[in-house]
Image (cartoon, rainbow, N blue to C red):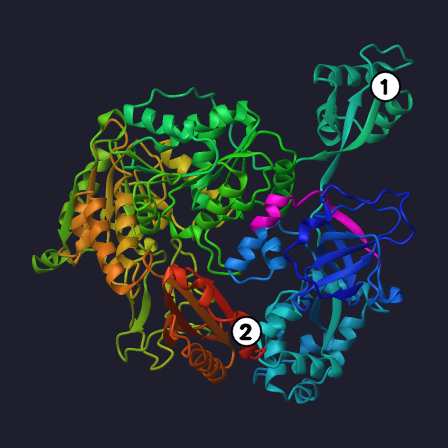
Amino acid sequence: MYINDVNLSPVMVAEPGESYQLSAVVNRWVEVLVDCPASTGLLTYRLPAQLEIKPGDILSVPLNGQQMGGVAIRLLAKLPADLQLKKILDVEDIIQRDFLCDRYWTLMERVSQYYYTQLIQVIRMALPPGLLGRSQRRIRLTVAGAAVSINTNPNAWLNTPLMRAVHQPYSRLIKFYLLNTIENNYLIKTLALLSFQDLVAKVNNTDANKILQLLQQQSDGDYSFRHLQGQVQRAYQAVRELLRQGLVESYLEPPRLTKPKFQKAVTLVGSTFDYDLTTRQREILEVLRRRGGELWLNEFLQICKTTTSTLKGLEQKGCIVIEEREVLRSEQGPALVGDEAKFLTSAQASALGTIQTLDGFAQVLLHGVTGSGKTEVYLQAIAPLLNQGKSALVLVPEIGLTPQLTDRFRARFGNKVSVYHSALSDGERYDTWRQMLTGEPQVVIGTRSAVFAPLPNLGLIILDEEHDSSFKQDSPIPTYHARTVAQWRAELENCPLVLGSATPSLESWISIRSQEEGAKSYYLSLPERINSRPLPPVEIVDMRQELQQGNRSIFSRSLQEALQQLQERKQQGILFIHRRGHSTFVSCRSCGYVLECPYCDVSLAYHHTEEKAPELLRCHYCNYARSHPKYCPDCSSPYLKFFGSGTQRVTQELARQFPELRLIRFDSDTTRNKGSHRTLLTQFANGEADLLVGTQMLTKGLDLPQVTLVGVVAADGLLNLSDYRASERAFQTLTQVAGRAGRGDDPGRVIVQTYTTEHQVIAAVRSHDYHSFSEAELEQRQALNYPPYGRLILLRLSSLDPIQVQNTAQIIATALSTEEEFEILGPAPASILRVANRYRWQILIKFAPDALPQLPDWEEVRDICPQSVSLTIDVDPLNIM
């Protein structure tokens, strides 16, 4: 290995098809882009004789005593003269072959340049977890460190999770120490001899105390050093002190690489049994023959109720073969009845005809009202592509959307459909990703990360609900928008890009509508629902009048009446609440004290999952949780009151007022487990509940024909936000959730409760009028030079030190203020200053779209930041709060 600073732009000029054969020259070298933050250039490695490497292969290489992942960039027939041969190390192994083709590499570079992110970070994000693995330094408690308590109570350490594990005979902690000590009773002896006072006297460093506290809170007393650095300001010095005192130990964890899964299979050899076999052996072989001649070993043993030794005997006689085969891990959906293409309306047929005539890259905005049949257009546009040997990529904003959409696609295209999103296991993502590389015609459905799916023969890209902010990644870097990357990819693959929505983003709307004549952009409209079903009427309820007339319930009288009628008419409804949890905050009625997160500048939300379950207060930013206190921590008053309404509070109130209604809650609290989205939606679709109560996930394209009622409990929570996009988001959310009603044979009804009936968004939602809303909103954006007429870059700074991050933000803002091409807003503290003990400041840069070449040198800006201050450059941010 040797660092070689070169320009990365012509990376693939090394002829991607070229490789070294085993009979090549004795010394062969390759330049590798290594997954190491400290490495900014290419590193040169020697190729072992047994490896045949091509540019684009993913490799495992040594660096500074550790194993790192990297990408082979170019092969060298001759070593540069300035490199010392004795310092060059060997490539360890090939992890994945043929990953990067020319077009894909160009896409990676473009994302890297546009979003100001190192190329290796873009590549790492595009790969499934576990391919670019690397060793990491970890810190764990010793026996002495586990016994130290930083509390004032000398016996408090007995109640730490780590010490409680001492009494669990099969705990990981006990097994680790008993396997790694000379005498099996060493742990007990050590704990008995430890002097609490002596140990506590050793830990006189505040940062060391914090490290110990973090480790003791972990059940196995183990954290990565990188995590500790993010939590404690002077972690390096603190860990050195703890190592010196023998309270912690450091070790290097090898890379956890995702690998194929193998399983033993039994295969029948021949169809006749001309062997010297027992009756039992013939019965076993007959079972295998009837099952097609192949079965997994475990399944076969269970069916035949036999043993491995019996099968070994059959293998020795040449009747069967037992061998390991790869098992493809993929998401398994339910068995589905085949689906045929539906009859199209004239508007659908016209839109489909336009899409099918497109040759090469073109951008299409498919603007269809809710229930107008956009998905059927997608399906019929994809069908001929698969017959031509091409693939299609379908992006959706939320994981919750994928089960329903996947089922519909699989009913049409069978096993040619696969899903790709973060809710899959690492093994499932890895195997699905490798199947894409085969080049077989297929349909991949996924969330924003699927925009990087390595489909070699891509014929169409679709973004469903293209307006949704979930397509934008805020963290980690790169802060890409899937819609932007999809456009670049469609250009590189020379295929059409279809953007579908009932409420298009203003960026897409103005981009398509303002294109010059001859540009490859198309606006396709689906103005009516299938079968000429009407859009549901929207009733706006003024909650101020409800209060004046004595109704103190969170439900208006109109909504109460509609809910009462649901079960009577055997219909179903949706109730939308803009936040999860039970209550927004908990406050003492005696002194006004509000219970807040100790690590974030936010109040704790009250969560109560079910009767007799623990009452929890939870932070929605860092996930900190604590039990609900009986008394005020400030004045000891027992009068603690819940304020605000979340999904839990609403469901409890519904159960009280409408005990006959069957409810399903659908939010991030109830859909944490794998498959829970599908389970809950299936239960609702099967009529097991009358009402679906949920948050934003309900607005994202769900097709539930049996829903006749949609209620919005408090629309004001969407309107009154300090964000220039608040009105657009509110209109999109309310219009989308209203569109869930009346999609079947029965007419729908929408009830929106608000305290600001005069708001322009409410008026537009009432009439389903996208055009008037967009015109008014665009006029305001243009006057203020906000997107889509201007561009924004948001600098996010965070640190454990509040003074240092504030000073750094001021220095950066001062340095940028000398430029005249753009406007600087800030620096200012983030709307929530502290999250997870990190203090956050922001600088917003506003500029014209054509001012990009005059933007500052971001490497110089990064150099201003001290090591303890994190800087994120968010290009085209959607969330500036």
Percent position of residue 726, x then y: 29, 59
Left or right, 772 with reference to 302 = left
Quarter where residue 356 is shown? top left
Three-letter amino acid code of the residue under disc 1? Cys
Whether label 1 touches label 2, CB < 8 Å: no
Viewer can see residue 255: no
Q: Is residue 558 left or right of residue 167?
A: left
Q: Which mark is residue 274?
A: none
Query: Which residue range is magenta in the image?
Result: 90-107
Residue 271 is one of the magenta-drawn residues = no
- In which quadrant is the N terminus drawn? bottom right
Front one among 560 and 11: 11
The residue labelled by disc 2 is 862
Q: Amino acid at mark 2?
A: Arg
Q: Quadrant of residue 373?
A: top left
Counting residues from the N terminus, which is met first, the one under dot 1 or under dot 2?
1
Q: Is residue 266 left or right of residue 238?
A: right
Residue under numbered circle 1: 319
Quarter-wise, where is residue 627 in the image? bottom left
Location of residue 791 in the rendering, given as x and y in whole percent from the top left corner: 37, 61
Up-down: is 307 above or below 395?
Answer: above
